[in-house]
Image (spheres, rainbow, N blue to C red):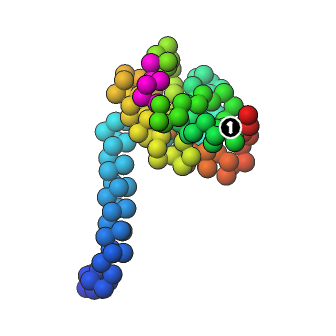
Amino acid sequence: MQQYLEFAGNHPYLSLAWAGILIALLVSWVQSLVLKIQFVTPTELTIKVNREDAQLVDIRSADDFKKGHITGARNMPLAQFSSQIATLEKNKDAPIIVICQAGMSAQGAAKQLIQAGFSKVAVLRGGMGKWQEANLPVVKK
């Protein structure tokens, strides 16, 4: 324990950065528990689309979406997301999977959907980065 205190005393900025990251992770984790945000892997996403007709909502920018997205995904950039939620009303009881680049921004969009009364909201864990890392197909247009 003494070594940790000594390190923190010798490296205050590094210690503060570490503490900030830890707090951000804890807040994100607690929010996901409170809001009941589910996380799905790329494999689980594919199963939900095929078996449950899950709707895919990609919140990345239009440019990023055009560079490559999952087949059937709908682009709703985060900047306009809250004003476009009403367009998803007919899918309120259907599974909706929110996709971003790394999986972090999608949690905020998922929170908005849950608060708007959507019952089956999930986030692609790791986002498009994880999807592409798994060498899964993307559509470019």
The spot of residue 137 in percent (x, y) is 74, 40
- Front residue of 92 and 74: 74
Is residue 73 highlighted in magenta?
Answer: no
Residue in the image at 34% along x and 27% along y:
115
Quadrant housing residue 4: bottom left
Picture residue at 32% right of the left edge, 47% below the top: 30
Q: Position of residue 61 (x, y in %)?
A: 57, 39
Name the quarter where the N terminus is drawn: bottom left
Question: As displayed, is residue 126 above or below residue 53?
Answer: below
Left/right of residue 17 with respect to residue 132 in the rendered view: left
- Judging depth in this view, the residue of 87 and 134 nearest the camera is 87
What kind of element bears circle 1? helix
Q: Position of residue 110 (x, y in %)?
A: 43, 34
Please tell me which residue is depicted at 42% across the width and 28% down the height of the picture: 82
Query: Viewed as shown, does residue 18 lie left or right of 55?
Result: left
Q: How many marks?
A: 1
Q: Measuring from the top left, give residue 99's x and y in whole percent.
A: 55, 38
Disc 1 target residue: 66
Q: Residue furthest top?
A: 90
Above or below residue 15? Residue 22 is above
- For the C terminus, the quadrant is top right
Relative depth, front residue between 47 and 106: 106
Graded by Cα atoms within 10 Å as few (under 14), some (14 to 19) or many (20 or more), the crowding at tag 1 reads some
Name the residue type under label 1: Lys
Magenta segment, which residues? 81-86
Q: Is residue 39 above or below residue 20?
A: above
Can residue 122 be seen by looking at this rendering?
A: no
Can I make out residue 89 in this image? yes
Main SS of residues in magenta: helix
Q: Is residue 91 left or right of residue 67?
A: left
User: Where is 26 relative to 94, above or below?
Assistant: below
Name which residue lies at 61% across and 36% down: 62
